Amino acid sequence: MGKTDAGYVVVNTNRFVCHSRTKFGKAAAPDILRSLGVADESQLKIAGMLFFAKNISRFMRHAQMTAVAYKGTEKVYIYDRRDVRDDLLAQLNGAMAFLQRHLNIRSEIRGVNRHDIPELPLEALREAVVNALMHRDYSETGTQKIGKNRGQSACCDVPFFGKRRV
């Protein structure tokens, strides 16, 4: 497949097929990638790199996500940080794991069962992170930042699109 680690592309292609529940039969990874329009006969296109290449920063130095947790609201003191330089699904999963780790959780007892309720709906956070990753301008330099301030809601800083709060 050209410039990328072919073994990783095959693994990611298989993971994609499983997650998407798409029927490709016994097609080989290069055929699947070409049918998705993310590769040509010799190499992955940019979308193919974003979704299927390991360590994207080898090809696109700025296509990474940084998750940051700040102490207070001033964005001065960082108490936790995680950089994800792999494909977009890994960035999404890394951001969600980071945000879940830093969300405040309240518990309600219903009968004999305890129900944990995050301060923000996980579905809304996932939508915000997906939107931030999908609508980012990958031709511009800069890192996708997903952050959580203590005492405030989570936010996604999208370069050149301003700040979105969820």
Image (spheres, rainbow, N blue to C red):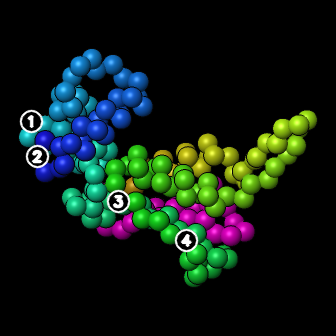
Q: For marks 4 and 2, give the one nearer the viewer.
A: 4
Q: How dense is the environment of label 4, judged by Cα within 10 Å: few (below 14), some, or many (20 and up)?
A: some
On the image, the x and y values in percent for residue 12 come to 31, 40
Q: Amino acid at mark 2?
A: Gly
The residues bearing labels 3 and 1 have C-alpha atoms spaced at a distance of 26 Å
**Residue identifier under label 4:** 80
Query: In the orientation shown, which residue stands out farthest toward the left?
Result: 42
Q: Is residue 161 magenta?
A: yes
The residues bearing labels 3 and 4 have C-alpha atoms spaced at a distance of 17 Å
Q: Secondary structure at mark 4?
A: strand
Q: How dense is the environment of label 1, judged by Cα within 10 Å: few (below 14), some, or many (20 and up)?
A: few
On the image, the x and y values in percent for residue 90 come to 41, 49
The picture quadrant where one finds residue 40 is: top left
Q: Residue at x 55, y 71 (%)?
A: 80
Dot 3 or dot 4, earlier in sequence? 4
Residue stretch in magenta: 138-166
CB within 8 Å, label 3 to label 2: no
The residues bearing labels 3 and 2 have C-alpha atoms spaced at a distance of 20 Å
CB within 8 Å, label 1 to label 2: no
Q: Residue at x 79, y 42 (%)?
A: 115
Of residue 137 and residue 124, the one placed in the foreground of this image is 124
Dot 4 or dot 2, earlier in sequence? 2
The residues bearing labels 1 and 2 have C-alpha atoms spaced at a distance of 9 Å
**Residue identifier under label 3:** 85
Is residue 32 visible to the viewer in this orientation of the structure? yes
**Residue identifier under label 1:** 41
Q: Residue at x 76, y 46 (%)?
A: 116
Decide if residue 43 is on the left or right side of residue 135.
left
**Residue identifier under label 2:** 2
CB within 8 Å, label 4 to label 2: no
